[in-house]
Image: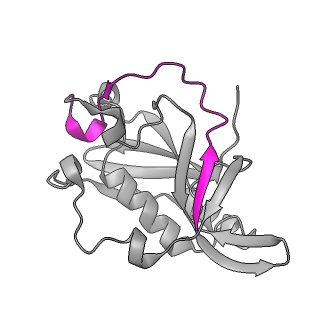
Amino acid sequence: VWLISHFHQNKNIRAPGKIHPPRLLGKAVGVFASRSPHHPNSLGLSLAKLVNVDGDKIKLSGIDLVEGTPILDLKPYLAEGDRPENFSCGWAEDLPIAPIACTLGREAELQLNTLVAQQKIANAERFKALVIEVLRLDPRPLSYRARVNERFAVVLGGMDVHARYNAGEFIVESIRPFVATD
């Protein structure tokens, strides 16, 4: 199903016409050609897997929203209409993936296993693959790229993932549920 949501924790008040995704190394792209949170509205669109329906309750998995995000509407995913035969990823299609290694440290592995046991993450291997895929795309702002061994964080699937970059490698130090602070 498609989830239409409200980014209730996005405090951004500016709406630039162009943004600078880290993968473009300083080049600009139109905000509507990106998944930047710096859009002129606070609407989100996410695809989630419908697990089951029990009366007026639905169970979903694979949600990429922060816990407590208001859902404005649900729409069915219809493969014949929502999955085009031919598609393009636009400007992102030709970008190379940086040759960056990524590993989970011992503490992060233990935390991941605990989160699976607590049913906060459904599948450890799938989440680990997501973390590695995202970090290999190097989501750090350009200002961080010259910094070595400095800790940074990214929120993935409702989890606060902390990592360090050093000598061509990301080492994930911790994975914890994301808790919003004002």
Q: Is residue 44 toward the left or the right of residue 140 in the image?
A: right
Judging depth in this view, the residue of 85 and 127 nearest the camera is 85
**Which residue appears farthest toward the right when viewing the image?**
55
Indicate the quadrant containing the N terminus: top left, top right, bottom left or bottom right: bottom right
| Place of residue 11 in the rendered image (x, y in percent of width and height, measured from the top left) | 60, 25
The spot of residue 103 in percent (x, y) is 40, 60
Q: Quadrant of the C terminus?
A: top right
Residue in the image at 40% along x and 43% along y: 35
Helix, strand or loop: magenta stretch: loop
Residue at x 33%, y 24% (from the top left corner): 17
The residue at the point 50 percent across, 74 percent down is: 125
Q: Where 69 sits versus 110, above or below?
A: above
Q: Is residue 3 magenta?
A: yes
Front-lying residue, 118 or 82: 82
Q: Is residue 5 magenta?
A: yes
| Residue furthest to the top | 14
Q: Is residue 90 left or right of residue 139?
A: left
Query: Camera-side residue: 99 or 15?
Result: 15
Q: Residue furthest front?
A: 81
**Quadrant hosting residue 122:** bottom right
Q: Which residues are magenta?
A: 1-26
Q: Residue at x 46, y 45 (%)?
A: 163
Query: Hey, which quadrant is residue 32 in on the image?
Result: top left
Q: Is residue 100 left or right of residue 176?
A: left
Position above or below: 41 against 118: above
Viewer-side residue, 84 vs 182: 84
Q: How is the image coloured?
A: one colour
Q: Is residue 60 above or below residue 38?
A: below
Residue 83 horizontal/vertical position (percent): 37, 72
Pinpoint residue 138: horizontal percent, then vertical percent: 32, 45
How many marks the image carries: the answer is 0
